[in-house]
């Protein structure tokens, strides 16, 4: 189905969401049609943020908003759906468009398997009516279902379209780029060199995939790295939990701008605890690059000042490798909490692989490394 027809059938003129590779056609269409426009389209920090933003739109206009997300974001919307939108509370209507990663019977990455299994059940538990869209869904069938949904929306209930892989099409082309020159995989290679025997907690997406392949190329094994393959936004909190229990070990966190934004409150907790053994590195390309390249707001804010305001004792931004190497070396010697923002280009090599070890194997090797070092 052409994504434009889905948008026309829904009939809303306000979309907010967190990009998803399964919904790349929708995201590209919205960027081509609206770009980032406060009247029509906002990419928010996390899915709960989107849901509350959508509620504000409805309160101000009386019109139906649309929230899009990967199904991993269902967990983030449970609270605002149950305690804000629900028809027994404020009765705020909303349409959700949800990319179905980990659909049962369809091969996917391990972090999506259980989430895919419970996707529809979570919607049922939240009393959200849903309709699954596949490649074979006809426009008239979708139109009939939207008419049914309008009856639910009219009484302050919510509805969801769950999108199977490859269900939506878009002929337009959208190019995502910035003016930065540093390549993320090379940045991570420099971090690995500086970290030495220290441990690394890496964020969701291509950063962890690149870290895995760098270790493979160096024939070093993977025990010193914890690859946060799911749970976007929580790598820095995992690192804090480790650092507080292992104060004698240097803990390096490789974060992304989308991840740091998603649960930015974590920075306040890290800063307040001020672990002297943590180096928090945010590789900032201003994009949700792993799921297609749609923009974040990270290029419009001052992450260094935010980190400083949260209590990080040493904060810096770099945009070239000489400066990065100098800051990494200083952070390695320093016994104070450090924050390094690295400006990065958008893109990765086409043949980037995925970890060949399982998540549990990674966990076991990492815990063993922590216990003997």
Image (spheres, rainbow, N blue to C red):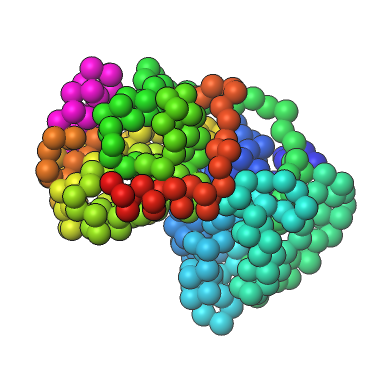
Q: Is residue 302 above or below residue 122?
A: above
Task: Tell me what residue is drawn at x 68 percent, y 69 percent.
Answer: 121
| Quadrant of the rendered image containing residue 223 | top left
Q: Horizontal placement of 157 versus 45: left or right? A: right
The question of residue 308 being in magenta is answered with no
Region in magenta: 315-330
| Quadrant of the rendered image containing residue 146 | bottom right
Visible residue check, residue 103: yes
Visible residue check, residue 38: no
Q: Is residue 24 above or below residue 367?
A: above
Q: Horizontal placement of 24 versus 265: left or right? A: right
Q: Is residue 237 above or below residue 346?
A: below
x, y (%) of residue 172? Answer: 68, 27
Task: Looking at this view, name the residue that lies furthest to the bottom.
Answer: 88
Q: Horizontal placement of 198 versus 139: left or right? A: left
x, y (%) of residue 216? Answer: 48, 29
- Residues 92 and 256: in front is 256
Counting the numbered discs, the total is: 0
Q: Horizontal placement of 244 versus 366: left or right? A: left
Q: Quadrant of the N terminus?
A: top right
Task: Tell me what residue is drawn at x 61 percent, y 50 percent.
Answer: 110
x, y (%) of residue 292? Answer: 56, 34
Task: Tell me what residue is drawn at x 15 percent, y 31 percent.
Answer: 330
- Residues 32 and 362: in front is 362
x, y (%) of residue 343? Answer: 33, 27
Task: Tell me what residue is drawn at x 39 percent, y 53 percent.
Answer: 367
Majority secondary structure in the magenta region: helix
Task: Looking at this view, name the residue that lies furthest to the front.
Answer: 372
Q: Is residue 46 above or below residue 295?
A: below
């Amino acid at each position: 189905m052409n994504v434009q027809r889905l948008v026309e059938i829904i009939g809303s003129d306000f979309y907010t969401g967190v990009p998803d590779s399964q919904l790349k056609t929708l995201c590209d269409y919205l960027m081509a049609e609206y770009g980032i426009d406060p009247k029509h389209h906002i990419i928010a920090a996390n899915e709960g943020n989107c849901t509350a933003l959508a509620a504000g739109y409805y309160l101000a206009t009386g019109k139906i908003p649309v929230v899009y997300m990967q199904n991993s974001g269902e967990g983030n919307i449970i609270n605002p759906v149950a305690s804000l939108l629900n028809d027994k509370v404020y009765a705020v209507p909303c349409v959700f468009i949800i990319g179905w990663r980990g659909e049962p019977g369809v091969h996917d990455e391990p972090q999506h398997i259980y989430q895919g299994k419970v996707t529809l059940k979570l919607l049922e538990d939240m009393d959200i009516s849903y309709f699954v869209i596949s490649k074979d869904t006809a426009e008239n069938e979708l139109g009939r279902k939207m008419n049914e949904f309008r009856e639910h929306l009219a009484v302050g209930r919510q509805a969801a379209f769950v999108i199977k892989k490859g269900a939506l099409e878009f002929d337009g082309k959208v190019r995502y780029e910035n003016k930065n020159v540093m390549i993320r995989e090379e940045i991570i290679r420099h971090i690995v060199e500086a970290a030495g025997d220290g441990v690394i907690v890496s964020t969701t997406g291509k950063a962890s995939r690149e870290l895995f392949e760098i270790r493979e190329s160096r024939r070093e094994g993977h025990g010193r790295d914890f690859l946060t393959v799911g749970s976007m936004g929580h790598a820095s909190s995992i690192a804090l939990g480790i650092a507080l229990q292992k104060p004698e070990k240097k803990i390096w966190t490789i974060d992304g701008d989308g991840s740091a934004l998603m649960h930015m409150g974590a920075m306040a907790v890290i800063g307040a605890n001020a672990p002297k053994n943590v180096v928090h590195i945010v590789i900032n390309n201003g994009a949700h690059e792993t799921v297609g390249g749609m923009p974040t707001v990270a290029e419009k804010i001052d992450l260094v000042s935010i980190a400083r305001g949260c209590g990080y004792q040493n904060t810096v931004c770099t945009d070239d490798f000489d400066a990065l190497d100098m800051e990494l070396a200083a952070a390695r010697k320093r016994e104070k909490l450090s924050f390094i923002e690295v400006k990065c280009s958008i893109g990765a090599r086409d043949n980037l692989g995925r970890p060949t070890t399982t998540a549990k194997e990674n966990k076991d090797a990492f815990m063993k490394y922590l216990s003997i070092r």
